[in-house]
Amino acid sequence: MRILHTMLRVGDLDRSIRFYTEVLGMRLLRRADFPDGKFTLAFVGYQDECDGAVLELTFNWGVDKYDPGSGYGHVALEVDDAYAACAEIKRRGGTVTREAGPMKHGSTVIAFVQDPDGYKVELIQKKSA
């Protein structure tokens, strides 16, 4: 078994695709409309779906906002340099909600950014060998 994807409901699919591709550097892997169900799916990721887990962005037609709720945590991405990643995300128009730095009860360098729908994305700096 392996993880295939994590699904996030989004209020504006094009805006979300721009965030994940232009701000976080993922690729749009596929997109499909389902007129009978009145929804569109878009899959984004850093690698092809056969090679790793991706995000499924689900847009339900006519719904422009969701409340992430108290049960959702975050999606985590490994980065080489969390400080540089935050600077680049800001340069690209993204929102950093927690600047890069050591986590409160440890030494791992982390940061948090927020997507256009309010979902948190954690950046975890790769540990040096």
Image (tube, helix red, strand yellow):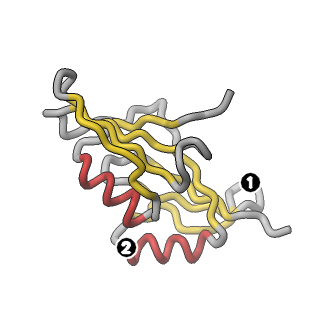
Q: CA distance from mark 2 to mark 1?
A: 30 Å
Query: Would residue 124 appear left or right of 59 to someone viewing this image?
Result: right
Foreground label between 2 and 1: 2
Q: Quadrant of residue 66?
A: top left
Question: Residue under circle 2?
Answer: 92
Q: Quadrant of residue 2?
A: top right
Give the answer, above or below, for where 82 lies relative to 114. below
* Label 2 secondary element: loop
* Amino acid marked by disc 2: Arg
Give the answer, above or below, for where 65 lies relative to 45. above
* Label 1 secondary element: loop
Query: Would residue 25 appear left or right of 12 to someone viewing this image?
Result: right
Nearest to the observer: residue 6 or residue 76: 6
Residue at screen point 56% across, 35% down: 4
Residue at screen point 32% across, 43% down: 31
Q: Position of residue 23 (x, y in %)?
A: 40, 66
Residue at screen point 46% across, 49% down: 120
Q: Position of residue 95 (x, y in %)?
A: 39, 64
Q: Position of residue 51 (x, y in %)?
A: 61, 46
Give the answer, above or below, for where 87 lies relative to 68. below
Q: Assign the N terminus to one quadrant of the image.
A: top right
Query: Would residue 42 appear left or right of 44 to someone viewing this image?
Result: left
**Residue that protrudes farthest toward the right in the picture:** 129
| Pointers 2 and 1 in contact (C-beta within 8 Å) | no
Q: Position of residue 80 (x, y in %)?
A: 66, 69
Q: Assign the C terminus to one quadrant of the image.
A: bottom right
Question: Residue under circle 1?
Answer: 105
